Image: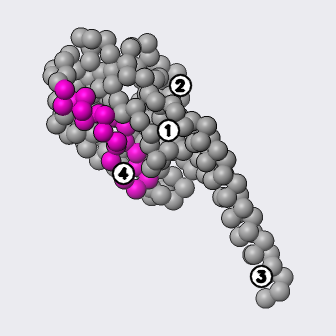
Amino acid sequence: MQRLVAAGYHQHQADPTTFLAGVRRADFRWGWGFTRLHTFVLFGRVEHASGDNVCEFTALALRWAEQAKGGMPRGFRTGAAVLPVLVCNTADESAHEQLSRRPAKHFALFELPMLVVLSQGRWATYSGRVVWGGVYQDFLRAQQQLVVGDLAGEAPDMSGAGRRAVMSVVMSVAMASMVLFAIGYWFVYRLFF
């Protein structure tokens, strides 16, 4: 938790009956198409994790983050990313299978669940490419690495990082062009009409 606070996260009051702790931060980047991403990391604990535990905990974390986000509605130059971290002593194969599936798509809301197995000192998460919200993937992978620190884990797949960087630049240029066009149109309209 100290690593997260040192990296700019703020502790956030989470429901103590559901979550051990919760932190959040908000970042604005030009390379994200002029968007602000609110990132939530929520911790939960079970003795033995199954696929159902992962699904239920992720759903609870998503609902909580939607309510806690505040500010502009999602999709209006703002979005939310939720990293639900389920800590357990043991996990069955269904938990790992659930994590290997591509995260569900939501409008301007991204989920990237994680499982930390204490008895093995390992962690696991989805390691494939993300298309929906792919511009945020490198940032979210770095946040996951920040959460787990030195634990061994299923290394995130960073293939396609160069392509995401190019897409980020293209999106930024497109957004800047649209803004400049709108300003120019407004001036022309004001001068001639």
Tell me the residue that label 4 is attached to: 105
Q: CA distance from mark 1 to mark 2?
A: 18 Å
Which of the labelled discs sits on residue 37, or is there none? Answer: none
Is 191 left, or right, of 62 in this rendering?
Answer: right
What is the C-alpha distance between the residues marked 3 and 2?
Answer: 46 Å
Identify the mark nearer the N-term, 1 or 3: 1
Q: Nearer the viewer, residue 178 or 61?
A: 178
Q: Residue type at mark 4?
A: Lys
Of callouts 1 and 2, the N-terminal one: 2
Residue 18 placement (x, y as % from top left):
22, 34
Q: Are marks 1 and 3 in contact (CB under 8 Å)?
A: no
Chain-order first, disc 4 or disc 3: 4
Q: Are marks 1 and 2 in contact (CB under 8 Å)?
A: no
Is 124 on the left or on the right of 147, as rendered?
left
Q: Crowding at label 3, few (<14), some or many (≥20) Cα neighbours within 10 Å?
A: few
Residue at mark 3 = 189
- SS label for mark 1: helix
Question: Is residue 98 within the magenta segment?
Answer: yes
